[in-house]
Image: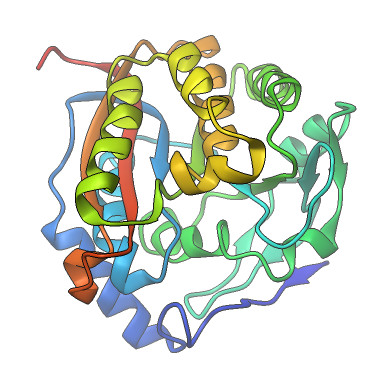
Amino acid sequence: MSIRPAAVAGTWYPGTAGALAREVDAHLALATEGPAGTVQAVIVPHAGMMFSGPVGAYAYKAAARGTFDVVVLVGPSHFHGFEGVALWPEGAFDSPLGAAVVDREGARSLAAFDIIRPLEDVHRREHSLEMQVPFLRRLMPDVPIVPLLMGFQRRETIAALASALASAFKGRRALLVASSDLSHYFDAATAATLDRRVQDSVASFDTDGLLALFEQYPEAERGRYVACGGGPAIAVMKAARALGARDGRVLKYAHSGEVSGDYDGVVGYLAAAFGVFDAQ
């Protein structure tokens, strides 16, 4: 069995089980329950736990009210540029809280699509999925995962991944998780303006609007202005809609300056959910 060791344990989050469990639980205790209804997909951030954990907790607390038999993690690749989507096909993602086992059925289903290839090396240093494992180990310890990293975030790749996800997980109780931070290193006021546009598209479940916003900037700048995981987020939104989701909700927004005290260069963090929700 192929085990991916935790790459950022002890740096981006506590490296011992007790300390990590206490931090995750503290973030969850401060998060609200989220909308009444059925959560099918979420957007979560992936910075260091002290920065983005308080935001991601909102999405996971909302999702944890449901019952799932697989969690599909989709994030951006920060260290490798490549075409298509990289799958970790089997084994597990290790963590101080225990290993999150890979769902072999889901992985095999996705590997049948041309856009998706088993590429374990792409995953080894990447933090965007690893930062989700502590929440999953605390809230859904028996639910297996399917880890996916998107390379170049092209329109065609986004559409193909959305179609593959909708096909592979039709009829299964799957939670789709898109890992993305929002704008990077603008002052807090500029970040709030840029990030509001993303939040508006999310709240209205407007994938076309979010894609247009994402493509407004050259590919190398999209992560800075919009979202480093914009492609994964749009793909997950499209797949969730195909699987029956009809509503989008912004659950929490914050930025790194609220923790660091530095408001001159911040990173935005979003927690959002998609599904079928009761009226607000």
Q: Residue at x 23, y 43 (%)?
A: 192
Q: Position of residue 81 (x, y in %)?
A: 79, 51
**Considering depth in this image, is 219 or 178 the residue closer to the camera?**
219
Left or right, 69 with respect to 123, comes to: left
Q: Position of residue 30 (x, y in %)?
A: 12, 59
Q: Position of residue 178 (x, y in %)?
A: 50, 40
Left or right, 156 with respect to 184, comes to: right
Q: Residue at x 74, y 27 (%)?
A: 157
Q: Can you say which quadrant of the picture contains the C terminus?
A: top left
Q: Can you say which quadrant of the picture contains the N terminus?
A: bottom right
Q: Residue at x 33, y 51 (%)?
A: 269
Q: Is residue 249 above or below residue 134?
A: above
Q: How did the renderer colour the structure? A: rainbow
Is residue 72 shown to the viewer in this render? no
Q: Is residue 262 above or below residue 243?
A: below
Left or right, 221 with respect to 135, comes to: right
Left or right, 178 with respect to 139, comes to: right
Residue 185 image-quadrant placement: bottom left
Q: Residue at x 49, y 12 (%)?
A: 208
Q: Is residue 183 above or below residue 5?
A: above
Is residue 53 shown to the viewer in this render? yes
**Considering depth in this image, is 140 or 7 the residue closer to the camera?**
7
**Considering depth in this image, is 221 or 51 the residue closer to the camera?**
221
Q: How many marks?
A: 0
Q: Position of residue 186 (x, y in %)?
A: 34, 55
**Considering depth in this image, is 150 or 147 the residue closer to the camera?**
150
Residue 153 image-quadrant placement: top right
